[in-house]
Amino acid sequence: MPRNELNLSPHSNLFLSPHPDDLVYSAFAAVTRYAGEADAIIFFNSSRFTKWGLLPKKIVTATRTLEEKLILSRLGLKSSFVWLNDSSCKREQVESREIQSHIPRDSWRIGKVFCPLGIAGHPDHVALRDAAVEYWLKAGRRFHLFFYEDLPYAERIDNVDTELRRIIITLSKSSATLSVCYWPLNTKLFERKLFFSTLYVTQNDQRVLLKRHGRVLGRICGSPFAERYVYAEGVKDVPIA
């Protein structure tokens, strides 16, 4: 598989996504904040999963990849795809070094990296999260590492705050002290998020779950809606927000 050679500019920001749709569902606030200043890599875009059940891989992969490329381009993100099989396809376990081989080598140019938190334990999300942490440590913690809360999975979990604390404790043992932050979204921006979420026509409509979860988080930070992130501060002299 060829390496992704992204043309990173100094202090570029990098979004790592397990599947098409994860960034819109889970990190829309950050995506819109860094539009034009960030790149996105989607790793497990080879898939059979649709809202109609499992369909032929070639058709689903082509459709989902095109959906994501068009949507992220409209949101101001340059995207590249790794073409790894997702969990709906038969496959061997993907090793961390295989995932890391598709992340740009010039980490000194990166200001912030966004990756999944792995809440609910989806294997693709957890594999990408663990690879991102290892990449961050190997890079000498040069950049700030943000974990976005995996949606819609987080909304389906009972006692999601307890699960969040458990993951933070686990990650802190191997990486660094982690902090939780809330990213407010006003009503207009959140409605835009919901609109873009409906453009993934091969997938189930998640607007009810996204709206319910976003409203709960918004109450915590005094905003109509919000998204939740966990972050580990890097050593580079780049502002956190």
Image (cartoon, rainbow, N blue to C red):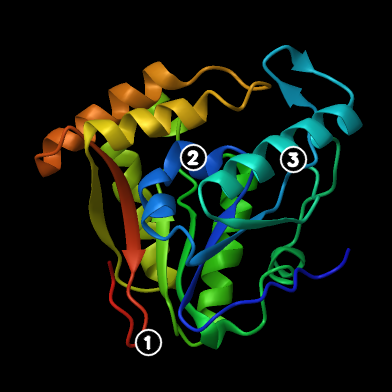
Residue 131, horizontal then vertical, whole percent: 61, 65
Mark 1 is surrounded, within 10 Å at the Cα level, by few (under 14), some (14 to 19) or many (20 or more) other residues, namely some
Q: Amino acid at mark 3?
A: Thr
Looking at the rendered structure, the secondary structure element under dot 2 is helix
Residue placed under numbered mark 1 in the picture: 236
Looking at the rendered structure, the secondary structure element under dot 1 is loop
User: What's the CA distance linking mark 3 and mark 1?
Assistant: 33 Å
Residue placed under numbered mark 3 in the picture: 65
User: What's the CA distance linking mark 2 and mark 1?
Assistant: 27 Å
Residue 23, horizontal then vertical, whole percent: 51, 45
Residue placed under numbered mark 2 in the picture: 24
Q: Is residue 49 visible?
A: yes
Sequence-wise first label, 2 or 1: 2
Sequence-wise first label, 3 or 1: 3
Is 128 drawn above or below residue 53 in the view shown? below
Observer-side mark, 3 or 1, equals 3
Observer-side mark, 2 or 1, equals 2
Q: Is residue 150 visible?
A: no
Residue 204, horizontal then vertical, whole percent: 58, 18
Q: Is residue 190 left or right of residue 187?
A: right
